[in-house]
Image (tube, grey):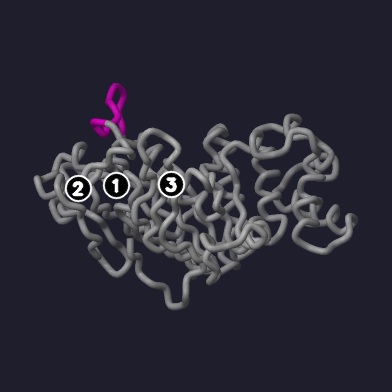
């Protein structure tokens, strides 16, 4: 989707990205024609149901897909470098140093046989010519920065000895070890309880502002997107169907799928015994995508045109775009509003209040 261009060149530019997995009986078109720009110091949230292409898009920025069974077309530029064209040696230097990632389940992402401090020190020394003592000092400073209590003692701990929230903080420290410009977060709060989720979200937002990071944050929780994001891109069937500033997209969603997502959340306006709204049907089979809009079979406004042709991207405003033939048709029932997003701040402003 052609998002509005910032005044300066975006740090992350994804242009017409297509990702196809070829290991099964039929090729799976996991991502189809995704175009996305993320400015320096900006937080972009990708939201949508499981299987919509969010994590595939995110992992393409680090080329984590198996090369032999994956076809990737388009451009993925980070600070002007084409990630899809990097050699293995360049890719090793790029991962962790330019772009790093916070994974959904740190217990699986962290090495179980090495202490956490040793893993962070190894990452630092792999990318920078520093002494072991300096790497240890920086690892300790990182644990302090992500607010792990008793950081010197925790550096000697193994992943299984930490709680879920502390492991995720250690995962964030590891991701920040080599001072990346771009931070990718793949549903980093899904496995945590509600209180810890809020703590991790606030920590991520504070670190992003303090360090001036560009962040791409994958979530299926619109409330989490409101808390941390400057912009939101809604994905469905491997495509971005709506994109805009978090304030405008939450206040005035135009795509029927975005409206359905907002309507299906729990909210304070519900009364006892009231059922949550649901989205009828199931997500499309990515190995057998329909010729038209992927949401047409679940959409109450779909026409024959929707089922036969791909809708173009249309500008709702200078800061809001949608891929839908029916976006100007009024929705049947407006969803109760989400809490107001935090006050907007200039992109890259590291002095905004946490």
Chain-order first, disc 2 or disc 3: 3
Say what secondary structure mark 3 lies in. Answer: helix
- Between disc 2 and disc 3, the foreground one is 2
* In this rendering, the label closer to the viewer, 1 or 3: 3
Identified at 22% across, 42% down, the residue is: 290
Q: CA distance from mark 2 to mark 3?
A: 20 Å
Q: Main secondary structure of the magenta part?
A: loop
Horizontal side of residue 257 vs 329, given as left or right: right
Q: Which residues are magenta?
A: 270-281
Residue located beneath label 3 in the image: 54
Q: Earlier in the sequence, mark 1 or mark 3?
A: 3
The tag on residue 258 is 1
Q: Secondary structure at mark 2?
A: loop
Q: Is the residue marked by circle 1 packed among few (<14), some (14-19), or many (20+) residues within 10 Å? A: many
Residue under label 2? 292
The quarter of the picture where residue 296 lies is top left
Q: Is residue 278 magenta?
A: yes
Residue 338 visible in the snapshot: yes
């Amino acid at each position: 989707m052609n998002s509005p261009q910032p005044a300066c060149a975006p740090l992350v530019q994804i242009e017409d990205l297509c990702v196809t997995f070829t290991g099964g009986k039929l090729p799976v078109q996991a991502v189809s024609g995704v175009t996305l720009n993320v400015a320096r110091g900006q937080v972009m949230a990708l939201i949508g149901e499981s299987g919509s292409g969010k994590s595939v898009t995110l992992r393409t920025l680090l080329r984590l897909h198996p090369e032999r069974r994956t076809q990737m077309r388009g451009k993925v530029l980070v600070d002007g470098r084409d990630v899809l064209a990097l050699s293995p040696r360049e890719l090793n230097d790029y991962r962790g140093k330019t772009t790093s990632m916070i994974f959904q389940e740190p217990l699986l992402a962290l090495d179980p046989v090495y202490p956490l401090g040793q893993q962070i020190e190894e990452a630092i020394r792999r990318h920078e010519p520093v002494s072991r003592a300096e790497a240890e000092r920086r690892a300790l400073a990182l644990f302090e920065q992500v607010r792990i209590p008793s950081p010197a003692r925790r550096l000697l701990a193994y992943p299984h000895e930490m709680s879920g929230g502390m492991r995720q903080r250690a995962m964030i420290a590891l991701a920040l070890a080599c001072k990346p410009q771009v931070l990718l977060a793949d549903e980093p709060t899904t496995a945590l309880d509600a209180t810890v989720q809020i703590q991790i979200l606030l920590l991520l937002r504070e670190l992003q502002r303090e360090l001036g990071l560009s962040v791409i944050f994958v979530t299926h929780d619109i409330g989490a997107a409101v808390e941390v994001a400057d912009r939101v891109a809604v994905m469905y069937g491997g495509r971005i169907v709506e994109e805009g500033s978090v304030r405008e997209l939450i206040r005035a969603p135009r795509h029927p799928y975005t409206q359905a997502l907002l309507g299906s959340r729990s909210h304070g306006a519900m009364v006892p015994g009231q059922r949550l709204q649901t989205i009828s049907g199931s997500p499309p089979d990515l190995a057998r995508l329909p010729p038209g809009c992927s949401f047409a079979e679940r959409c109450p406004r779909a026409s024959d045109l929707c089922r036969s042709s791909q809708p173009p991207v249309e500008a709702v405003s200078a800061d809001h775009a949608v891929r839908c033939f029916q976006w100007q048709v009024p929705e049947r029932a407006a969803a109760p509003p989400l809490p107001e997003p935090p006050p907007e701040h200039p992109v890259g402003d590291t002095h905004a209040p946490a």
